[in-house]
Amino acid sequence: MPRFSVIVPAYKVQAYLSECLDSVLTQSYPDLELIAVNDCSPDACGAIIDEYAARDARVRPVHLRENQGLGPARNVGMEHARGDYLLFLDSDDTLTPDALRAIADRIKETDEPDLLVYDYARTYWSGEAVRNQVSLALTEQGPAPFRLADRPGLLRVLMVAWNKAYRREFVEREGFVFPPGYYEDTPWTYPVLMTAESIATLDRVCVHYRQRRQGNILSTTSRKHFDIFEQYDRVFAFVEERPELAPWRPVLFRRMIDHFSTVFTRRDRLPRGTRAEFLRRARAHYRRHHAPGAPVPLRSRLRHTLVRLGLHRTYRMLQLAMSARRRARKLAAQLARATRAASLQLHYRVQLRLPLRADRAVFAASWGRGHSCNPGALEAAFRSHAPHIRTAWITRPEHHHTLPPGPRRLRPGTAAYWTALARSKYLVNNVNFDRRLVKRPGQVFVQTQHGTPLKHMGLDLQERPAAARNTDFAALLRGVDKWDYLLSANRHTTLTWERVYPGRYTTLEYGYPRNDVFQKATSADVSRLREELGVPEGSVALLYAPTHRDYRRTQCAALDLERVARRLGPRFVILARAHLWHAGPLAQGQGPRIIDVSDHPSVESLCLASDALITDYSSIMFDYANLDRPIVIHADDWEAYEAARGAYFDLRSFPPGAVARGEDELIDIFATDHWRGSRSSQLRATFRERFCPYDDGRAAERVVRHVVLGETTGLPAFIPLAERHPVPSAASALTRPPLATLSQPSVPLPVTESH
């Protein structure tokens, strides 16, 4: 008896069926049977199913002699099922990697519930994946299992069959079956949820719900959409037969009217000339099943009233009026934006004619994000070493909380923003400012950059179209022409920048200011940061910070962090840091040993709080090496990454520590303590000699003295690597003797966005 019976009905989906079946058969949890039901499909679905059955004994093909529809086809699949739990998967959708393992683990944790509800994400032809908007209803916090009355918010989750795992004994005992027709999930899902004695949730995306451009049943114009009335009759008939379910009638009634309104307002569902008939049927059902008691949100009350009265023409006129209003507001907003933009540019041109302010400096980082990276460290150094300079920071409102006391806040695109760009003597950024910036005589632009380059940058991207993505290289060079100074952390970076960003600027090979904190922080700082992040005392914290993949349309985590944490055991905690351009967390769900730190404003703080770094090709490795803590490289796709982006050296041949070429090898590196062995230490020492010669804690001071105070000689000498004592990690501090730096006073930590 397999653990799972995955039922996949197939009808006219030959283009998607193989991907669907593969997503099931390649799961890391293999204890399953795949019941593929060919619903008399006229295309190649039947042949594809037979081919898979010939290759894998877990595939059980079922061929129907005539087309029966989705619901009856699922019923046939249930008749053949032998698994403990039933899962339904539409043949154009897919299971996410390791979904079945996560489902199996959650079922075991919650004592074999009747029903497990998990999450999904809509996937589009563009590669975009958007998670369910009401995923908060699937939180795993609180008692489990439970009944629907304890978590009624589950009724807000999409009413479909394929986002749940059903205990087969429960389904057979209650006699649940799918009806024929459209909207067959409605009279299945509501009764299942209301009847289940034990329900659990899994806060993880387990299904990718494909949004097809064409061919989706519910987006097909047909009278079959009138089936929705009969399906809700079945739901209320089920409730009538069970008096104990009567309290759910008001909720079901409200959901029904909302569903009717949705079908009525969608232009692609009802045939021309049938809307009045549909609304009359909806009015009849309103009167038949009316059950007051469930509160109706204000935004839905008008729709409920129009359904209750059956006012077809009024409903249509209101729709047209609202559509016209939206178009008018959109046009007015566009006109207002154009007027404002023109007035701001006029204001900027006026400001450019006024004198420069020699005592002003304006800073920004990472396209308007918070007080961070090298500009953040330099802004603090300006206030310390050149206090006569008044500083301002450009940031969007959602990042204002990252600003320390001192710099003036500037919102991008405001009059104050353009005034600061026009009249401040010093401009500091780790990317370029607005392309409309006019570099005035006397202004000083310090380009700090935001990492040591491993991947190709600048003009080298001309041969990498996947990474360049229509970059205007002429505009890039016009931006370079505005630079006066460019910061570098090592000779490799200097030689690379001066070739890929050719210009008349001066390179300051002083180290990266953002890394100063690694030499100044104390053990007290480390302990405080770990406590703030929720790292359990005595655990080993691994910072996982992957980089962006240019060759992928969608960015997904290369590691199954839940599996890694489970395999490593309770001693390890993973701090998961998504890349700046990565949408959403790296882990599908969070547990006590996976902490999502993607929104944490300071990368340096995360480095200090961790005991080791796991990364792939992110430039964070060059900064982290200054801490002299273990680094493990996960290079599972180096060939593809190098082909798409290009690299300045083979990281596998010159790594900062142990290299894993797959997830299992990575787990083994930590399980055997190879991550902090002598060979790893030797590799890290060689890496530090090449890439960390100048990051001795005084980089920001050198830059300020040179650029602002004009001191080109007598700058602080570089401290040799052997004489530096970065603060030890929490784990190593338990075994190492205290160092001199531990007695230093606690220092404020700058913030930096992810690499």
Image (cartoon, rainbow, N blue to C red):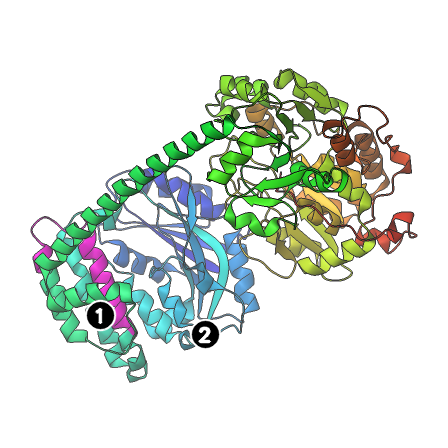
Where residue 540 sits: x, y (%)? 75, 54
Marker disc for residue 234: 1
The answer to whether residue 546 is seen in the rendering is: yes
Query: Which residue matches tag 2?
Result: 198
Mark 2–mark 1 Cα distance, whole angstroms, equals 23 Å
Task: Assign the magenta stretch its main secondary structure.
Answer: helix
Mark 1 residue type: Arg
Residue situated in front as seen by the camera: 408 or 659? 408
Which element type, helix, strand or loop, lies under badge 1?
helix
Where residue 674 sits: x, y (%)? 79, 43
Where residue 726 sits: x, y (%)? 83, 44
Lateral position of residue 601 relative to residue 48, left or right: right
Mark 2 residue type: Ser
| The magenta segment | 251-277
Lateral position of residue 15 relative to residue 639, left or right: left
Marker disc for residue 373: none
Whether the magenta-drawn stretch holds residue 541 is answered as no
Report the quarter where the C terminus lies.
Answer: top right
Which element type, helix, strand or loop, lies under badge 2?
loop
Crowd tier of the residue under label 1, counting other residues whose Cα lies within 10 Å: few below 14, some 14–19, many 20 or above: some
Residue situated in front as seen by the camera: 701 or 89? 701
Sequence-first disc among 2 and 1: 2
Whether the magenta-drawn stretch holds residue 262 is answered as yes
* 471 over 579 or under it: above or below: above
The answer to whether residue 674 is seen in the rendering is: no
Residue sitting at x 46%, y 35%? 553
